[in-house]
Image (cartoon, rainbow, N blue to C red):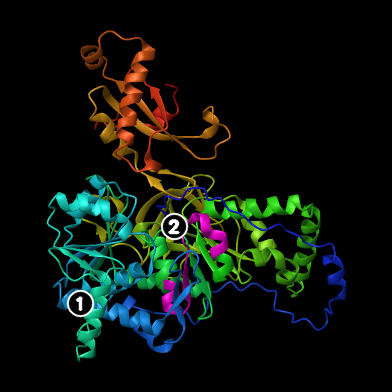
Amino acid sequence: MSFLNIKTPKIKFNKMKLGNNILDDLQDIDYEKLERKNVKHRNTPYEDMTHYKTVKEFFLKSIEEYPNNPCILEKPSHKEPYKEITYRDFGKDVIGLGTALIDVLNLKGKRVIIIGETQYEWYVSYMAMLCGVGIAVPTDKELPVNELANVIVRSNASAVIYSRKLESIIKKIKEKNLGVQYFIQMKSYEELKDEEIGLNYLIEKGKRIVENGSDYFEKIEIDPEEFKILFFTSGTTSNSKGVMLNNRNLAENINAVSAYVKIYPVDRLFSVLPLHHCYESTIGFLLPIATGASIAICEGLKYIVPNIQESKPTGILTVPLLVESLYKKINEKIVKSKKDKLIATMISVTNALKKTGVDIKKKVFKEIYDNLGGNLRIIVSAAAPIDKKVGTWLEDIGINFLQGYGLTETAPISALTPEYNPCIGSVGKAIVQADIKIKNPNENGEGEILIKTPTLMIGYYQDETATEEAIDKDGYFNSGDIGYIDEEGYIFITGRSKNVIVTQNGKNIYPEEIEMLLDKEDEIKESMVYGKKPEETSKKEEKELIITARVIPDYEKIEEIYGKLTKEEIYDVVWKKVKEVNKKLTSYKAVKSLEIKEGEFEKTSTMKIKRYKELSNKT
């Protein structure tokens, strides 16, 4: 999966006491009276999987069936406790906003950008769009002004719903006169003034319209096949791809999960990932809404632990960087308490007991659970590879560790770990509606992963050529990922065939975008950007790929501008230009290393650089 600009969080846990009396407590348990569960793993999906066709179908069902259940939990401020918004209130706000966006602002069928940090109003806005207003364009809040302007122009957006923290950026956008009719600010009650209006004002206005007898919005019928969501894969230049999705794509994700994982109305998911990405907005938002579960919003990375401990989630949707950080910090505390050997022993004992049908992990590892809120039962990791030992450790202490696989183009789930038969190291099995196969497998069964699924996008926005290249005549999507499928149907990713650079936290970086900016500089003749492994650099302590630019300087132009220079001086000139380009990019895309290329790049007959050849050669 593509995405996510997540910095390494500073996670702090309380000291682990983990008393020596754990072993004594185990001896006092009356094992005969403990409930013994069937230890045989099922190999078939749950029979009661859902069959939704649209998002609106399960939205209306949930607000009717679970009106008093908590839906979304948000902290008004850091010092205040979580505030619960019920399904009844969420439903009224969505219907109110949808009504006002159509009746007051005449945005029916229009494109609307939603941009901002995770907050209640983001959820309300997205659901209103999906349930009948127009086409939602979820957008990365970290985009610089020039990239946001490109998204607005390319999507032909009529309105921008934005958070207060982005006021300064929106002010600069307004100055560009890009044809946006309305700028709608979250958490604002301001009436319409010029093109500015408050989102909360619209919600209340819409509620009054509904109270006066209008049920127009609620009765809008959704065509499952209609273009409803536009995700930009890299939010940027004209080379970034826009992924067009419909209601069926999203609804089939919910159906797919229900076949492999049970989510209940008492469950609570912890939202820490950005909502502009399909992974979080679909599985982290729409899935709990479909099941009557609740969502607790994380205030920010530095508040992860206290927020988890207060909201007490049962599930966390995340990326490897965050899972590994939790794992590392908890184990550091265990080692400091000098209880690591005791924990290892208890893992062996509880694993043996679990094989007989007796699961006492939550009792034995209670202190670890309490540090994670006390109720955690599922952690889902996706978007990038994760160390197998982390997943094994989570399973060892009694937390179901699941992995998902897919891309924005598959909205996003195409494979998922069945909770009833996990396989650590695999990204799961193909969802029940999908057909996943390997193209031209080698002697090890490895090849490009092809995906045919009802979650697959309509196509790339305004790019029929790219769509035809990505989806073959039989309807299979060329994922660009290399892997194999074992005899039981579990999928293992072993590499990537595309040029995309995937950071440790799962964010995708498209080299062509950076190269295009570099090549515009007079001092640079040509460039190739790639992710260099840390061991290839002097920064061996780093695990993250080093974004590296291999550059052929324009020696004639440099001499013309600067005069005769040494190799070292040429390097300095080019590096200065690279740093100027970095200012035009979001931070995770910035080039961190420069290589000066001697000679020319090896190219194909169509003048494309043979990257695989270049990367096998030294500069």
Between disc 2 and disc 1, the foreground one is 1
The residue under the point 70% across, 53% down is 333
Image position of 573 (left or right of 351): left
Q: How many C-alpha atoms fall within 10 Å of the one at disc 2: few (<14), some, or many (≥20)?
A: many
On the question of residue 581 being in view, the answer is yes
Image position of 354 (left or right of 56): right
Q: Which mark is residue 100?
A: 1
The residue under the point 17% across, 67% down is 110
Residue lying furthest front in this view? 79
Q: Residue beneath label 2, please? A: 437
Q: Quadrant of residue 467?
A: bottom left
Does 293 lie within the magenta span?
Answer: yes
SS for dot 1: helix
Q: What stretch is highlighted in magenta?
A: 287-307
Q: Which amino acid does label 1 sit on?
A: Ala
Q: In which quarter of the image is residue 364?
A: bottom right
Q: In terms of depth relative to the viewer, which is nearer, 90 or 517? A: 90
The residue under the point 58% across, 51% down is 325
- The quarter in which the C terminus is drawn is top left
Q: Give the image location of residue 53, x and y in percent.
A: 33, 77
- The quarter in which the N terminus is drawn is bottom left
